[in-house]
Image: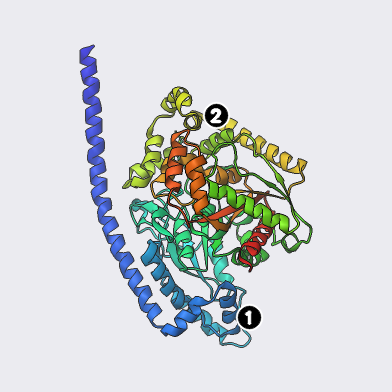
Amino acid sequence: MLFYVVILLLGALAYYYNFENKRKKIREHLEVVVQRRREDLLKNVELARKSAKKLDEQRRDWIGSLDFEQLKGELQRGHVKCVEAVRAYFHKAILAHEKTNAITSFVLEAEQQAEEMDEKAKDPSFVKPPLFGIPLSLKECLKIKGYDQTRGFVQDAYKPATSDSIQIEHYKKLGLIPFCQTNVPQSLLSYNCSNPLFGTTTNPYDPTRTCGGSSGGEGALIGAGGSLLGIGTDVGGSVRIPCHFTGAAGIKPSKMRFAHRGGGASVPGKPLIDANDGPMAADVKTNVEFLRHVWGDIDFQSDRDPYCPPVHWNESLYSSEKKLRVGYYVDDGWFTPTPALQRAVFEAKRHLENAGHTVIPFHPPRLPKVMQLYYRAVCLDGGQYVLQKILKDLIEPTIRVQVVLWMIPVWVQRLLSYPMELVFPRMGVLMQSLTRDTFELREAYADIESYREEFVELMMQDNLDVILCPSSVMPAPQHDVPSKVLAGISYTCLFNLLDYGAGVVPVTTVSKADEEKLINEYPETDKWYQMTKSATRGAIGMPVGVQLAAPPFREEIVLRAMREIEIAVTGK
Ligand SMILES: CCCCCCCC/C=C\CCCCCCCC(=O)NCC(=O)O
């Protein structure tokens, strides 16, 4: 017996030694790659700076002071040249990058693309496309020719795309000029924004706090004024959470409203957890203008990807005079949001009511089940695809907790979930989420389908057009909190599970009264609540948005409600 135990221990030791040795070699190689990539980024930023300096300072500042609508008008009228817009935004993005570390690469070809467009515009018969010359920032994972899509994995550096995605082709056709790529968390499966290749992107309002993720670089850049319009992706909140954390506005449309052929994802092959790209900007108005033109011309994408239905921008939904019926909630029954987030929903409710809409209570059903189904379907192989990739890379410290969770075998998680339920019931629920086998996976898909039916039925019973709810559970926390408070995405991931269109609009900032309410009333009943409470302390002044959502192909209603709230909040 002793003999076998000794053999087993020796075997385990040899395995560990071998594993560590291999990891050490991988680490050494990857550290060299990181060094080289960071040096290349410094050179790339210097080239963008050189280009920006070609523009007279006064003119640069004037162009930089124009909002989206004004810049669009000046470019259309020929008062601003495309190359001037690109140089002005190189300058503004460098300033934002120096503040937040938001950029992973400037797209230096933007200058040449702009010059070519200016050349074409000299011909009096040339018809300018609707978004002529507007600089566009892109989340790093979006496929643009000549640039990497690493998703924060060092192993994927120096593997540039050989072509643009259909969507990028489309944006260029509409006149937009991609001018930079922005940072993401390693794997994209986090709502913070750190990776070992490019480091941590910070919140423009407070560097000790995250800008959110995974489209965090976009949030930071837009929040710091370095871009007028950017594109993110969202499989659990990655467009909406950074918007909420940085005071931006953005929308995740339902999956079929854009082409996906040839596009990448954090975890390929996870049907029913629907991801999509989505615009992000300083205001809702810009999102509307962008989508009006993209969807107005959606045949470009449908012709190249037959799985993208040619559903055009529906102006009559957006501009309708018919008053809306809105279902609202401030607490989903799974994770009570901090006071400022609840207040934001009540304020948005009041704005909608003042505009003549009917706003009634709505209760999203069975959120603990939703969380289980979401994690089950997002990590459909028990997290193995991402885990294997992470283990071949430098591991990002701020997502270590979730990496460790993925490493615990599913059967062990299940076993431990029962005692866990007694002391930390919500964690117990999540520990039962990852799949043991295909039987459970099929069951999860069937459950998601019936949950969708149930939700639609509930909305129909009350004749609801749109749902109003919090964007998250807290304002921007510190960088390591998202990986620890995994369950804090319930407000956003619900609408990925449902494949609804869902957007976030800024409404308020955290106030002193919110802080007092937090200290005196916010629950501390488990670790997640304790961490959320402590992360929210000292967040006075941080932006807070609300979320609106509607069933697929009704994104225009979501945008209408967002825009009405925006007008009530900002007066413009
Ligand atoms: C014991 C608990 C077991 C559960 C372990 C789960 C580990 C974490 C897995 C997934 C986290 C998902 C967070 C998603 C945040 C938003 C991500 C997003 O929208 N990404 C965009 C994209 O992928 O394109």
Nearest the eye: 68 or 138: 68
User: Which percent across, then down, holds residue 70?
Assistant: 58, 77
State which quarter of the image contains the C terminus: bottom right
Quadrant of residue 14 within the rendered picture: top left
Say which amino acid is labelled 1: Val
Look at 64% across and 48% down and name the residue there.
500
* Residue annotated with mark 1: 127
* Residue annotated with mark 2: 440
Secondary element under disc 2, as helix, strand or loop, is helix
Q: Say whether residue 257 is left or right of residue 193.
A: right
Nearest the eye: 183 or 458: 458
Quadrant of residue 16 within the rendered picture: top left
Q: Is residue 133 above or below residue 504?
A: below
Q: Say whether residue 55 is left or right of residue 317.
A: left
Q: Is residue 198 above or below residue 430?
A: below
Secondary element under disc 1, as helix, strand or loop, is loop
Q: CA distance from mark 2 to mark 1?
A: 56 Å
Look at 49% across and 44% down and name the residue there.
518
User: Is residue 177 something that shows in the picture?
Assistant: yes
Say which amino acid is labelled 2: Glu
State which quarter of the image contains the N terminus: top left
Q: Is mark 2 within 8 Å of ligand 1?
A: no
User: Is residue 548 something that shows in the picture?
Assistant: no
User: Which percent across, then down, holds residue 135?
Assistant: 50, 71
Q: Say whether residue 550 is left or right of residue 144.
A: right
Whichever of labels 2 and 1 marks the residue nearer the N terminus, that label is 1
Q: Is residue 22 above or below residue 547?
A: above
Which mark, residue 548? none
Q: Residues within 10 Å of mark 1 (few under 14, many from 20)?
A: few
Q: Residue furthest top?
A: 1
User: Which percent across, then down, holds residue 457?
Assistant: 73, 39
Q: Residues within 10 Å of mark 2 (few under 14, many from 20)?
A: some
